[in-house]
Image (cartoon, rainbow, N blue to C red):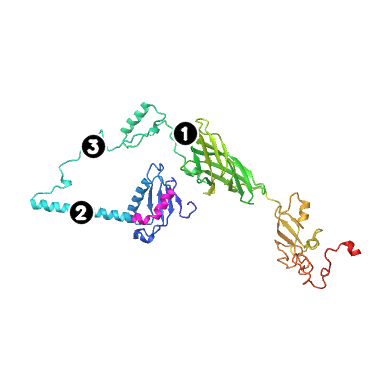
Amino acid sequence: MGRMAQFRRSGDGVIFTLPIEPKRRTELPSGLHSVNSIHLIIPLLYPLQQLRVQLNEANAEDAEPIEDLFAEKAAEQKQMTLMSHVNYLAQNLHNLAKQAHALAAKADKEKAAAATAAAAAEAMAAAKGKQPQRPEDSTSLPQPFSKEKGHIQVIARPPEWNVGYEDDDVEDSYSDSDDADDGGAVLGGEGDDVRAPPSADEVEHGTMISFPNVELHSIELLQISLLSLSVKCERCKTLNDITGLKPSVEKATSCKKCATSLSAKFNQQLVHENSARAGFIDLSGCKVADMLPSTFVPTCAKCSTPSQGLVSVRGETTANVCRECHSKFTFKIPEVKFLYVSPGSLPPPAAGMRRKQEKLGLHAGDQLPERGACAHYRKSYRWFRFSCCNRVYRCDKCHDQAEDHINEWANRMICGFCSREQNYAVEACRFCGRSVIGRRGKGFWEGGKGNRDKITMRKKDPRKYKRIGTSAATKKD
């Protein structure tokens, strides 16, 4: 969704602004008719913390009950992805509005019933001549806060947090948390090296590579140790291979045709059952075309031992045995997808040496030498600029005699009568109108469109009555 115009992302990577189109906008309350976007609030510890949403361009009285219902639904369905939650909100916004309205009506009825019951109790007490006892008139006084049991609720430390600590350290940490005034968990002392997790902006830029529907059997993690790609040059659209890309190591090369500088850098991510993203690729001067056979490192799901590098490619099933517990594991990558996220962080390629422009010494309006004809084609009054080397020759045979490569199709020509360069034309110059293929409309060939039917051929044509298959010896006889 990053390619949409309304997509926004906060600097801390917590709040995402996403466009939304409700399914049945007409059934929504009047305060929600103008909803076109939402704020998706993803906590840093998601899914340990609760997912929330805010409706933009909406009335607060109508939006807040729906936001609370969505938070409850998201807490119940933790196995759903973030995109599934957004789709659920877009498809069921009118249903959530109806549920919120029903809950509000039910709450109003309960309040009315409570008020009616209180009024009835007061009436009965007045009839008996007694003053009714109200909750606020109760003689029971609030008890002061106890020092031993205050308003701070201590949450037990998860067992995986105790790895690497002694028992005394664990008890000290619990005692410190009990005496804390702010109720927060004590993460470490002053001398501890507490590093914040890397920001997503440091990794998520460039082109994302993902493996949808990846099949992992007895594998908990899969990572790419050496990535090989087929890239397309942005200048000449030629396919080039960049092999042996190591994580976080930039590799530079050049196009095999136009010599444009190409560079690539691979930022690795781990593939597991809940994530199909393999990483992000920073490219400069080229775009990703396909993934070539690359080296993968799977981690055994039983003993968590990384295996040795295995070469695999799309559509191939790779199997091996763990070196530690000797259990068999397999993985298969049915397809590979590339998603352009941002231009990347690599600098643009430096401009290489430009080819020297060929100076022909021509002047517009003057004729070419011999009107552009050559020994191979006497009636071809033009020169050609070939796309393979961007040089000018009289014909393809003249090109092959002078160059060391095979000619490619010429896309431009120079008229032999006016010396003006132009796009390739079949018959006539676009400036002076002269025919560049000899006498147009006359002769047997007529530029490849001649008449070869002897019935409709004119009588003065010598080929009309010429015998076919007559050899030289027959003519002498």
Q: In terms of secondary structure, what is the magenta stretch mainly?
A: helix
Residue drawn at x 35%, y 54% as measured from the top left: 96
Q: Residue furthest bottom?
A: 459
Vertical side of 372 occupied by 283: above or below: above
Disc on res. 13? none
The amino acid on which the numbered mark 2 sits, given as a three-letter code, is: Ala
> What percent of the width, then of the height, locates residue 265?
56, 42
Categorize mark 2 by other alpha carbons within 10 Å: few (<14), some (14-19), many (20+).
few
Single out the mark in the foreground, 3 or 2: 2
Residue 302 badge = 1
Which is nearer the N-term, disc 2 or disc 1? 2
Which of the marked residues, 3 or 1, is nearer the chain's N terminus?
A: 3
Residue 295 drawn at (x, y percent): 57, 38
The residue most toward the left is 129
Secondary element at tag 2: helix
Q: Residue at x 47, y 33 (%)?
A: 302
Q: Amino acid at mark 1?
A: Lys
Residue shown at the point (53%, 48%) measured from the top left: 337
Which of the two discs, 3 and 2, labels the residue nearer the N terminus? 2
Residue 57, how many percent across, how many down? 38, 57
Q: Which residues are magenta?
A: 82-97
Depth check, front residue: 476 or 240: 476
Query: Is 422 or 444 nearer to us in this picture?
Result: 444
Q: Residue furthest right?
A: 477
Q: Which residue is mark 2?
A: 113
Q: CA distance from mark 3 to mark 2?
A: 34 Å
- Give the amino acid at mark 3: Phe
The residue under label 3 is: 145
**Label 1 crowd (10 A; few <14 / some 14-19 / many >=20):** some
